[in-house]
Image (cartoon, helix red, strand yellow):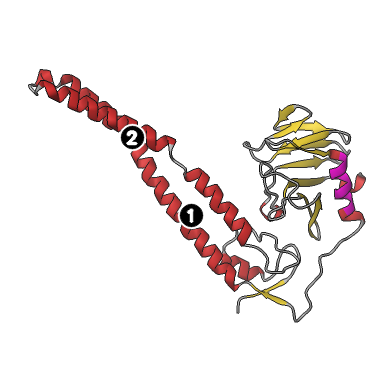
Amino acid sequence: MKILHNKTILIGREPGNNRLMLAIKAADGIKVATIGGAGSVPNSVSRCIPVNNMAHCKLDIDATGNIRLTNMKEENVTYVGNNEVMSKNVRENSTISLGRDKFPIGISEILKASKAMFEKVVTPPEPSQSEVYSITHLEKVWNEYQSRLKQIEKEQKRTNIIKSLYLPFSMIGSFVGIIAPSIGLPKESTFIFIGLGACAMFYGFYKTITDKSSTKKEEIKDWLIDNYTCPNPGCKHFVGFQPFRILKQNKNCPYCKGKFKTE
């Protein structure tokens, strides 16, 4: 256990394979381990992407061995026993459940797999000097992600404008409809303006209820995670939310250390 003192263990779903993934940032890089078979972890468990410090939850182990469980995002769901928690001290014999589907995992199992990362060094096969992986295709992936993201943001901006105007328009329409007779307008105008105000209000509510921009953003983010990956067939890890120009400068994968080329 001492080997894990002052360490943080990121816990989440492995992108692509849907296994439970553990990640620890160490002096020599990011150490990763998986638990279970492919497809064993439900989608309600958030992905673990250590290069971006993203995960479902984490375990912080202090210098005396105390263990603190913390959700990485407010919308994540984590249980200790039957109680939903955001942050809580846990013991080595505790069992936690992740996501709405309550995927169960014992703290002892997490600690055992985490200790193995340090006690038995497992290094992904390094490519030989002649093995260099082209990342040219990733430029197209990143550009498509940016293009689709901008389109979603444009749609969101238009929707926000409509949502900001519907209430004033509905109030103005209703007000004019009410005072129409007193300013000499035909009686029918009352129903017309009140009707227009009601239409504006219902349309605003409709746009608010049917606004899927947040969902679309999550979908495009998932698409990037599945496609913006290391070209090494033995790795295939997501390389992070870094622009392609930065990826070119890094010149290798943060996981398998495979070398990249762009020509």
Residue located at (59% from left, 68% from top): 138
- Please identify the quarter of the rendering in which residue 80 is found: top right
Q: Main secondary structure of the magenta part?
A: helix
Magenta segment, which residues?
A: 108-116
The numbered mark, 2 or 1, whose residue comes first in the sequence reads 1
For residue 175, side relative to residue 155 (left or right): left
Q: Compute the Cα span from label 2 to label 1.
A: 25 Å
Point 72% across, 51% down: residue:
18
- Is residue 115 covered in magenta? yes
Q: Is residue 157 left or right of residue 146?
A: left
Packing grade of label 2 (10 A; few <14, some 14-19, many >=20) is some
Please provide percent x and percent y for residue 110.
84, 44
| Residue at the disc numbered 2 | 203
Quarter of the view holding residue 169: top left
Q: Percent from the top left, x then y, of residue 105?
A: 81, 39
In the displayed structure, 191 sits above or below 66; it is above
Give amino acid for label 2.
Tyr
SS class of the residue under badge 2? helix
Residue 9 appears in the picture as rendered:
yes
Residue 5 in view in this figure = no
Q: Position of residue 42 (x, y in %)?
A: 70, 44
Dot 1: element: helix
From the image, tell me which residue sits under label 1.
149
